Amino acid sequence: MALEKFYLTTPIYYVNDVPHIGHAYTTIAADVLARYKRLAGYEVFFLTGTDEHGIKIERSARERGVSPQEWTDTISEHFRHLWARLNISYDDFIRTSQPRHKAVAQAVFQKAYEKGDIYKGLYEGWYCIPDETFLLESELQGGQCPICGRPVEWITEEAYFFRLSKYQDWILDHIESHPTFIQPGSRRNEVLSFVRSGLRDLCVSRSTFSWGIPVPFDPSQVIYVWIDALTNYLTAIGYGVDAQTFDKFWPANIHLIGKEILRFHAVIWPILLRSADLLPPAQVFAHGWWTADGEKMSKSTGNVIDPGKLVEELAQRAGASLDTAVDALRYFVLREVAFGLDGDFSHTALVQRFNSDLANDLGNLLSRTLTMLQRYCQGTVPQPPEAESAANALAEAAAKLVPDLDPLLNEVAFHRALARLWEYVRLVNRYIDEQAPWALARDPAQRRQLDTVLYNQVESLRIIALLLFPFMPHTAASMWRQLGIQDEIATQHLATAMVWGGIRPGTPIQPSVQLFPRIEAGRPLPAAERTAAVAAGPTMEAASVTVSFEDFQKLDLRVGRIVTAEPVPKANKLLKLTVDVGQEQRTVVAGIAASYRPEALVGRSIILVANLAPRTLRGVESQGMVLAAESDGQIVLAGFDTPVHPGSKVK
Ligand code: MSP
């Protein structure tokens, strides 16, 4: 019987800049879904790629003195490199500058033209001549070009237009009658009201630049980048050249995208497909956006998180391999924030998840189990008594995992799926604590019970590894190997592999390798972490290193009195404080704006780390750090219960 297919895509990413955490987020999510579907027995086609045409890319290339093709070759390679680093298992990587794509974009355009859906008209708008860019009224800054600051002109030129308006009723009906077509539901409502407000015809060609695919019947124009980009989803599965593959995979099961490009995918794309006599994709899922320490990531602010660097820093901090750090990142981005909502990227939260969920819950479970097997069973999986092997709490709980996880993953609710899996991890840890195998081992009469408990532990770990594999492929494969299982984890199928009892008694386990070394508080923080100059930090759990009294004395802690407090422009977490420390006044930048209004701070005594090397944050030099605690998401300043003179030493 033919396997059921699953076709999923990420957006194709622009090559005018190197990849960042936002691109990695969508791609990791798609990878998890692709791996899960393969495990569930589907024939999966997972597509990603790069979007390479357009004026911005032409300009980026020109600025560097290279041809657009050379430039796109370089940046596109950065994306492939990063995906290899992040263990992304895509089936195809499409580039819109490839010849295979030109033919498809042109065919779709031609078809719409022949249908009468594309007509020639006049494009009018604000135009920046040096930048060769059309601008919306709303994009202008003080009436001038936001890119170069020069005056813009109102120009009129010939261009082709697509009759979106003709399809307004059809798309409305399609969205209304297919409740899961646009997800999450809140986004669906946004799109519905956008469509109801009336669709205007779309300009689908440009004549002001040449780095693009020519309009097939008018080479003086190139196809508008969005039409060029969206049709990539057809090219990769053989539209026009391989009918068998195309018919198998189209329509796509899901396009995973960021929320900012939802209208293109949920309105323009289905209309274009309809014009080409093709079915719309089954679902478009728009996830939220990551900010960095509360702020939008942008090159100009300099706060863009580079996933490659992040992984290197994390590996270094944890003393772990890059693959381990990659898995921790994959886990973190999908566990921390509901897919669909916006999230703020915090290094502190990453370290907390690393230590609590990964090192404590999961890592310890494996290492304590393997140690017990070495100690009590000469390093092999024990043989449990027949009758007791399947009738136990862990086996029963394991049987509920796929029925619970499968709908969650079909809803793309990664965070809930992981939370559900962790309930099981914690259940196994509790089971061990309750059964106390170390006590059973002291009594030879309890041998059968000991074997049963240990077998259940190992078998549970096998099940956990299997279900973890889509999320953390390296970690899961490592668990699998340590449990002594010979078959490849990547080629397993849930239907057979989830049956309790899969690990054979007598299997020799492998030496235990620590999955996630705990990150200790004393290790240096990555640069982005240090930007919030507040010592609200690690939990007691994480703060396990001891320092000598001499080391402690190196800190110059002083009482300070806040003289002025004001927001730092474009940094919604930071406040700039002037602090009286007795002999002098210091400027200190503190990440406390979410918890304190500036005016409420004036006159207040605080504790300042006065001999910390100065740091420049958002252009302001911070000459010290204010001590505070983080509690229930609030930042609370450390202080005194009676007035103290500014400058007094705190010991
Ligand atoms: N080339 C178009 C997409 C064409 S698809 C037919 C494009 N490219 S992009 O390089 O700008 O990538 C946008 C995508 O990157 C978003 O849709 C999202 O998947 C991801 N992200 C970019 N920044 C992001 C965040 N800050 N947070 C989360 N994801 C975001 O648009």
Image: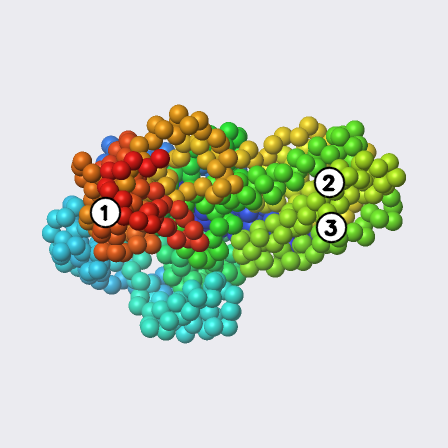
Spatial CA span between label 3 and label 2:
11 Å
Residue 154: percent from left, percent from top: 14, 58
Instruction: Please say if 608 is above or below 241.
Output: above
Q: Mark 2 is on which residue type?
A: Val
Whether residue 580 can be seen here: yes
Q: Residue at x 48, y 62 (%)?
A: 183
Q: Could you tell whether 619 is left or right of 12 in the image?
A: left
- Farthest residue, direction top: 550
Q: Amino acid at mark 3?
A: Leu
Which numbered marker is on residue 562?
A: 1
Q: As displayed, is residue 370 above or below residue 389?
A: above
Rendered location of residue 178, percent (x, y) = 51, 69
- Judging by the rendered image, the residue that carries numbered circle 3 is 394
Q: Residues within 10 Å of mark 3 (few under 14, many from 20)?
A: some
Neighbourhood count class around disc 1 (C-alpha, 10 Å): few under 14, some 14–19, many 20 upward: many
Q: Along the line of sight, which residue is nearer the eye, 271 or 345?
A: 345
